[in-house]
Amino acid sequence: MPRNPEKNAEISRVSGFKEKPAVKEAEDLIKNGALWNCGVFVFKLRYVMDILRNAINFISYGDVVRQYKSLAKTSFDYAVAEKCDSIYVVRYDGEWSDIGTWNTLTEVMSSKPIGDARIADDCVNTHVINELDIPMLVLGAKDMIIAASPDGILVADKEQSSYMKKYVDEINRRPMYEEKLWGEYKVLDLTVNEDGTKALTKRKRIKAGASIEYQSHKFRSEVWTVINGKCIISINGCAQEALPGHTFTIAESTGHGLTAITDTEILEIQFGKELTYDATEF
């Protein structure tokens, strides 16, 4: 909630920024002409990069990704906006909704389910999103949000859905689906053998013209099988064209990369005792 004494100016300097004030404080701020912040910030990238450099040392985007977990878990509002002494506000007097919870999201969604799902006629005010490759059937549900993805399944009363954060924070597992600069991937299976070795299977979709950067992994080997499209796969500096059905075995600490000529899909199976989530694979 920015506080601004220049009540009639379309653009004016903000005297202070207060994130999530208590009710009494919010009432006092509003009486004094405060404005609600709708969460839209505009800034030069260099400005935020300078702030970030106060927390970590980095040269490239990869450096930031590798150190991201070391950053304090706080919001942009608390970490930046409240501490900034030079903010200007642009007033907005139109329709606006803070789509920050599942409940508010459903207010702008169609009543039709998204994905492979069926909702029975006896369901009331219930929204369903299914990103899985298996069908979903919902019967007799009232005022509910049901969302299924490779990362998990949510079944909640809409009003209660805004309180899910503390429960989600208790879940400690690697992402099962991610969008990357080069495309996207989905984890299909994770197997742990009796000797402690693991096998992780991913389905990767790489956009035409995009590349998975040249890299190597110290504690795991990989097998890549092309299932669709045409690409160039480089292993130990040797590049060759790959087509559907071609399979490549990549040993530990072996350099490898891929460039998609057309939209390409590969199955990647990782083997090893340490299959840690690699956030640097962007």
Image (tube, grey):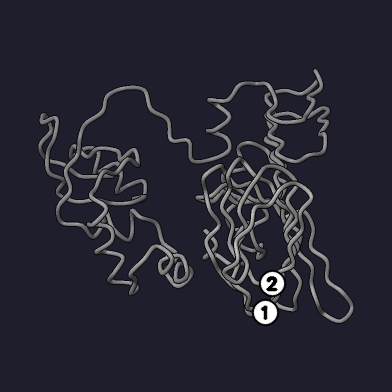
Residue 262 numbered mark, or none: none
Quote the CA–CA distance across marks 1 and 2.
8 Å
Using the rendered image of the protein, determine whether residue 132 is visible from the camera's viewpoint: yes
Q: Is residue 226 left or right of residue 43?
A: right
Using the rendered image of the protein, determine whether residue 167 is visible from the camera's viewpoint: no
Looking at the rendered structure, the secondary structure element under dot 2 is loop
For image coordinates 36% across by 50% down, the residue present is: 20
Percent from the top left, x then y, of residue 42?
Answer: 26, 43
Instruction: Give the labeled residue for mark 2.
Output: 275
Q: In the image shown, does 70 or 196 lie closer to the viewer?
A: 196
Could you tell me the amino acid type at mark 1? Answer: Phe
Percent from the top left, x then y, of residue 224?
Answer: 72, 59
For image coordinates 60% across by 61% down, the residue present is: 239
Height in image: 41 above or below 120? Answer: below
Residue 219 numbered mark, or none: 1
Q: Quadrant of residue 172?
A: bottom right
Crowding near the residue tagged with mark 2, few <14, some 14–19, many ≥20 C-alpha atoms within 10 Å: some
Q: Is residue 192 left or right of residue 178?
A: right
Percent from the top left, x then y, of residue 66?
Answer: 47, 70
Height in image: 208 above or below 215? Answer: above
Which mark is nearer the camera, 1 or 2? 1
Do labels 1 and 2 touch, CB within 8 Å? yes
Crowding near the residue tagged with mark 1, few <14, some 14–19, many ≥20 C-alpha atoms within 10 Å: some
